Image (cartoon, grey):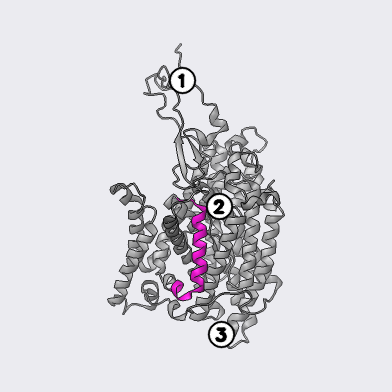
Amino acid sequence: MVTVKTSPPRTASLSLPSFFTSSYTFHSHNTYIQTQTPPQPEATQKKTMAAGGGNSGKSDDFQPFPVKDQLPGVDFCVCTSPSWPESILHGFQHYLVMLGTTVIVSSTIVPLMGGGNTEKAEVINTLLFVSGLNTLLQTFFGTRLPVVIGGSYVFIIPTVSIALSSRYSFLADPNERFKESMRDVQGALIVASFFTMTIGFFGFWRVFARFFSPLAAAPLVILTGLGLYSHGFPQLARCVEVGLPALIALIFFSQYIPHLIKSNRAIFDRFAILFSIVVIWVYAEILTASGAYDNSVSKTQFSCRTDRSGLTSAASWIRVPYPLQWGRPSFHAGDAVSVIAASFVAIIESTGTFIAASRYASATPIPPSVHSRGVGWLGVAILLNGLFGTGTGSTASVENAGLLGLTRVGSRRVVQISALFMLFLSVFGKFGAILASIPLPIVAALYCVLFAYVASAGLGLLQFCNLNSFRTKFILGFSLFIGLSISQYFNEYLLVSGHGPVHTQSTWFNNVMQTIFSSPATVAIMVAFFLDCTHSYWHDSVRRDNGSHWWEKFRSFNADTRTENFYSLPANLNRFFPSF
């Protein structure tokens, strides 16, 4: 009989998973330090290999990586910040990243409403202004995570349905048609905002989050990033001679130059977005000025040329957006129900973005009460969208969450500075319009990397799960596959037939089904959450297999001392708004 001696068992790893190899110290001078803990004692004898009894080397060889409830390697966490000059540059970088979605959404819905370049510039500036306000509200009073609250793609389906409604067929003036349709969208957003605020502020989302496990969260976060694949390379390929160099430049600046050029200051990896945009934008300007697209078809010219957006000439020098600027909102029950469905999808996708942001900001898992608080303030954001008339609702920006991972700067202050850029450049419209004229294939190249970071944050949640369990394999694989498959079916059906597969006499019901089931993240979480709560749930091993035991101590706000550092409200407001 062979006696095998091993290293002493690390029982502390079950209670303090984030401190296996490192711990985080937060100092009053606003720095973030990673300190090494004493190494574990080595084994006195080498292990005997199970296969043949041979030696395996040192006792710590081939050990699994320890589970981390806080992501290590982050340079600045949620409550620490770089120097002020560097923070301002990071904030401007976040502004540039969120600007792409703002322009894409506005450029999609405004022409269908009957608006021209002037109306499009005004809607873009209005959406930027409201996004700045909503980002400040979310970072101060919502989840307190470094998330940008901006325009959402999920509201495009009900908005387009309203814009193409036959009720405007008698209006010959396009400007009047634009205002009428915008008022209907405003009314629907206002009604939907009360639904979202009710879900959040009354604690309904907290109840859902209490049953949330890492196994159910992983497909949600993964498809929050991967589900936006159509906005990546397919949009880049519309002008591949501009988009592909942008993608290569971003990867080169962020992943290769930092290893080729050794420096004490992380410059290229933290500001790879700025370097890539400047270099490729200048390159695109040269192509435009040299006449490379003079004989191209109109679609190519619109995608590749730097002088075809029409925003710079249409934007006002100074214009302050204000509530009800398009007139008094109109209310229609069918429109409201359609937008409520979109707001439900926005809640789900924002939850996935919140989780990804918490990982890249090196925060602990989000308590259910903080999830619910963030959803409540998302409802306030949609209310402001309706009052100001942005034409779309709000959601947590996926691309900006990916930027946290790319730069390894998860600072809350940086995102708040980006909100100030949104407010300032939305008022001084000419300056913002110049930046909004960045060719969209460059923006799509950024998305290819940033959305991938969000998806990888979801993959990181699998460290809490037992991947050797067949139950885990089924729930994970099936929810991912069915989330992509169903949404792809609904989207392809819409493109080919001009309507969704659910095509009844009730337009609002068709819009509800199309909005919900065309979202990969929404389908995936519905499937994963249902299976995780019903499949073999009475077995004792389920709580360990789905990772619930790792998140158990974060179910209550006061159960872990680190939670207050990351998620408590400013000015000791927790006394008036306690978290349960």
Q: Which residue is mark 3?
A: 174
Q: Residue at x 64, y 63 (%)?
A: 380
Q: Could you tell me how far apart the alpha carbons at marks 2 and 3 are, in whole angstroms?
A: 42 Å
Residue on which disc 2 sits: 145
User: Where is 127 relative to 60, above or below?
Assistant: below
10 Å crowding of disc 1: few (<14), some (14-19), many (20+): some
Q: Position of residue 345 (x, y in %)?
A: 60, 59
Mark pair 3, 1: CA separation: 78 Å
Tell me the element at label 2: loop
Question: Which amino acid type corresponds to the residue marked 1 in the rendered image?
Answer: Thr
Q: Nearer the viewer, residue 559 or 506?
A: 559
Which residue is at the front of the view, 521 or 149? 149
Q: Is residue 129 left or right of residue 313?
A: right
Range shown magenta = 409-433
- Mark 2 or 1, nearer chain start: 1
Foreground of the two, 143 or 217: 143
Residue 505 visible somewhere in the drawing: no
* Residue 463 can be seen in this image: yes
Q: Where does label 1 land, which residue?
A: 6
Q: Give, as a three-letter code, the residue at label 2.
A: Leu
Contact? badges 3 and 1 (CB < 8 Å): no
Query: Which quadrant of the structure image shows residue 135?
Result: bottom right
- 420 magenta-colored: yes
Between the residue at mark 2 and the residue at mark 1, the CA separation in whole angstroms equals 42 Å
Residue count near mark 3 (Cα–Cα under 10 Å), binned few <14, some 14–19, many ≥20:
some
Q: Is residue 214 above or below residue 202?
A: above
Q: Is residue 117 left or right of residue 559?
A: left
In the image, farthest residue toward the bottom = 172
Q: Main secondary structure of the magenta part?
A: helix
Q: Secondary structure at mark 1?
A: loop
